[in-house]
Amino acid sequence: KERSHIPRVCCEIPNKIKFIIVDNKGMSLCATEAKSKAYDALKKSGVSAVALGKGNKYAVCHGKGSSWNYHQTYDNRCFHAQMHKLQASNIKQIEFGPNNTWAIVMKSGHCYGSLLGADDNSGPLGEINKHQGNITYVGMTANTSEWIVGYGYNGWISFGLTSGFKNKLREATSTTQVISVTFGATKSRYVINTDKRWYWNNVDDTFKNAVN
């Protein structure tokens, strides 16, 4: 899909009616079941990073700081505690994954997270550690062992994703710079956001109409 009036997207698509699109002015278009606090945060100007999870879980970075609803009791792996330490304007992406995992990608290329996969392919942690300081995006589905890590200029490594998605990503990286990859709950639903156009699969007409 060629870009129209919305030059970038920050979205989570865990089901058919939950997504958020953000334009270059930080204004959001959404069809979401998120609770009122998420709506309130999205009404603020300068929205730059968004994540929606199961239930009431959400995180929004905006011009006045950040808002979230996600608390864990895992010491340095606690999303709530980590967000308190970070300046919202330095956050590029927030991603929620399976089994209460999460990743926060900074504009500097550093990635904070509570993630699976330190010693296996259950999650992206091992690859993030290899490319730490040069991370551009992290994508996870709702299932373990389905993830992607972007690094540098169009570098990426994935596990458990479909050949169709990987072929589409190779097509995207051959002509454009990939900014982010977002999955739904399943790996068949995805959006690839680049500096020139979007690529998507298995998204609803509501989403397509929003970007036209």
Image (tube, rainbow, N blue to C red):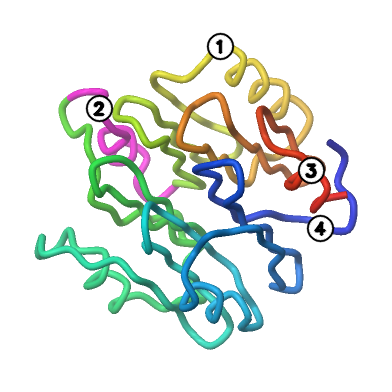
CA distance separating discs 4 and 2: 34 Å
Task: State the extent of the magenta-drawn residues as a range.
Answer: 120-134
Q: Mark 4: give few (<14), some (14-19) or many (20+) Cα within 10 Å.
A: some
* The one of 72 and 168 positioned closer to us in this rendering: 72
Q: Dot 1, how many residues are within 10 Å of its Cα: few (below 14), some (14-19), or many (20+)?
A: few
Q: Which residue is mark 3?
A: 208
> CB under 8 Å between callouts 4 and 3?
no
Q: Amino acid at mark 1?
A: Ser
Which label was assigned to residue 163?
A: 1
N-term-proximal mark, 4 vs 2: 4
Type of residue at label 3? Lys
Question: Relative to 16, does residue 6 appear above or below in the rendering?
Answer: below
- Amino acid type, mark 4: Ile
Which numbered disc covers residue 6? 4
Q: Position of residue 44 (x, y in %)?
A: 61, 83
Q: Earlier in the sequence, mark 1 or mark 3?
A: 1
Q: Are marks 4 and 2 in contact (CB under 8 Å)?
A: no
Percent of width and height locating residue 14:
49, 43
N-terminal of the pair, mark 4 or mark 3, is 4
Label 2, on which residue? 122
In terms of sequence position, does the residue under pointer 2 or pointer 3 come before the other? 2
**Residue under the point 65% across and 40% down:** 178
Q: Magenta: predominant secondary structure element? A: loop
Image quadrant holding the N terminus, namely top right
Query: Mark 2 vs mark 1: which is more N-terminal?
Result: 2
Q: Amino acid at mark 2?
A: Ser
Dot 3 surroundings within 10 Å: few (below 14), some, or many (20 or more)? Answer: few
